[in-house]
Amino acid sequence: MSVSAATGESPEIESRAQLVEWFESGCKPKRDWAIGTEHEKFAFTREDLRPIPYEGERGVKALLTALAERFDWDPILENGKVIALSKDKCSVSLEPGGQIELSGAPLKNIHQTCGEVHQHLHEIREVCAGLDIDMLGVGHNPKWARDDIPWMPKGRYDIMRNYMPKVGTLGLDMMLRTSTIQVNLDFDSESDMAHKFRTSLALQPVATALFAASPFVDGKPSGYLSSRSHVWTDTDPDRCGMLPFVFEDSFGFERYVEYMLDVPMYFVYRDGKYIDASGKSFRDFMAGKLDVLPGERPTMNDWSDHMTTAFPEVRLKKFLEMRGADGGPWRRICALPALWVGLLYDSASLDAAWELVKELSVAEREALRNDVPRLGMQTPFKNGTVQDLAKDVLAIAKQGLKNRAKLDGYGDDESHFLESLEDVAESGRTLADEFLDLYETRWEGSVDPVFREYAY
């Protein structure tokens, strides 16, 4: 197998079998399954609520530099600019509009996850206090227009910025004005991956409903409870959505490879720079016919990079990534992994969750995904609503967490992390509904109080 000089030790791709093997290498025995939680939040200045720029005394660069110096993070640079931090298998990174993301370490239980979140938010608060800024966890920036958001200095974002308007009307909003909570979970085999993928993809709208926390755009109600989720419906049809092929009996790693080969490229990374390959074909690249790198063939690093450029509701890499939830308060950051671990990491719960949705048609799954951002818990489902489905889903997840029996120092299992979601399912009222009520009453038609009352 040849090695590309352009990317060091990364082997050149010589066959499609290598791409399948890349996914297969993610299979882990159950004893090694981990939980990786990611969450994003908006940074803003306290006096005028504006998103912070990259440069300046109270900019993103100053924030990252202070975190590194005060809490021993290692800076990661691009073209001499700090664009991320790393420490102990964690990273702090930047989304295009300056959203600050923690990509957590692979942990064994939700108690550890919540401890990691608590430590991160403690560090953020300590540093933000000295800069007179705060952070907000919701799904969509509630106040500021797209043109008010400063862009971060990352090469891949420049390429995406130019490409997005060619394929959808809301891609730049996705980049600049949305934030999310995600969890990455493992599988032990191709069949286990497929079972988890189908179940979590069909149920992703339930997570969207439970976590809906973005009813405002441009300082007023948008007509959606999850404006973030709505944005994804018109970002890029080639790389987003509900992936009907996942529900076919023949689905497996090879079929996902075929899907990714048809997802248009964004870039190729060479010698510290991003080469614009937006809209071009990875199949052509494999044949040595990529016009921006004539005669050159991709490496496995290129394939790994390409995996990060698809944005379906559930994404497969060497793990499964749950992508349906809005950003939210810190309890929700712990609740999101609890929901999916309870459903997917206990075999009885996984089977029970699949039973809830296995008979849904492609049209019914699409309707759920498209209606939930607007209707939330009141979205019609069979003879009831998503609220009814959410109650069943949470009962299954709760039992799955109890079956895991991962106890903290007080003897409590992980199931209590679902309590904030159980409140939503019982009442039928999301955080977005609460925001709208406050907007109409105590907030007197202003979204400004959300920044102050719900900051971390």
Image: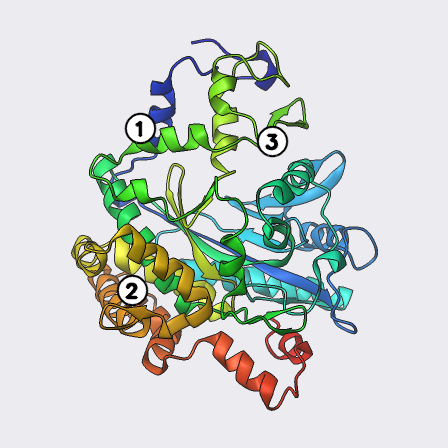
Element at label 2: loop
Q: Give the residue type at disc 2.
A: Leu
Disc 2 or 3, which lies upstream in sequence? 3
Q: Position of residue 302 (x, y in %)?
A: 52, 25
Image marks 1 and 2: residues in contact by CB distance under 8 Å: no
Look at the picture and state if 436 lies above or below 136: below
The residue positioned 78% from the left and 72% from the top of the image is 48
Residue assigned mark 1 = 254
Disc 1 or 3, which lies upstream in sequence? 1
Element at label 1: helix
Q: Give the camera-side residue of 388 and 370.
A: 370
Q: Quadrant of residue 453?
A: bottom right
Q: Quadrant of the N terminus?
A: top left
Q: Give the camera-side residue of 5 and 294.
A: 294
The residue positioned 54% from the left and 30% from the top of the image is 265
Look at the picture and state if 152 lies above or below 143: above
Q: In the rendered view, how is the structure colored?
A: rainbow
Look at the picture and state if 185 lies above or below 420: above
Q: Is residue 14 left or right of residue 58?
A: left
Q: Give the residue type at disc 1.
A: Glu
Q: Position of residue 18 (x, y in %)?
A: 37, 20
Disc nearest the viewer among 2 and 3: 3
Element at label 3: loop
Local crowd size for mark 3, using a 10 Å CA cut-off: few (<14), some (14–19), many (≥20)? some
Label ID, residue 278: 3
Residue assigned mark 2 = 407
| C-alpha distance separating marks 1 and 3 | 24 Å
Q: Position of residue 169 (x, y in %)?
A: 60, 51
Q: Quadrant of the C terminus?
A: bottom right
Local crowd size for mark 1, using a 10 Å CA cut-off: few (<14), some (14–19), many (≥20)? some
In the displayed orientation, state which residue is furthest to the front.
Answer: 363
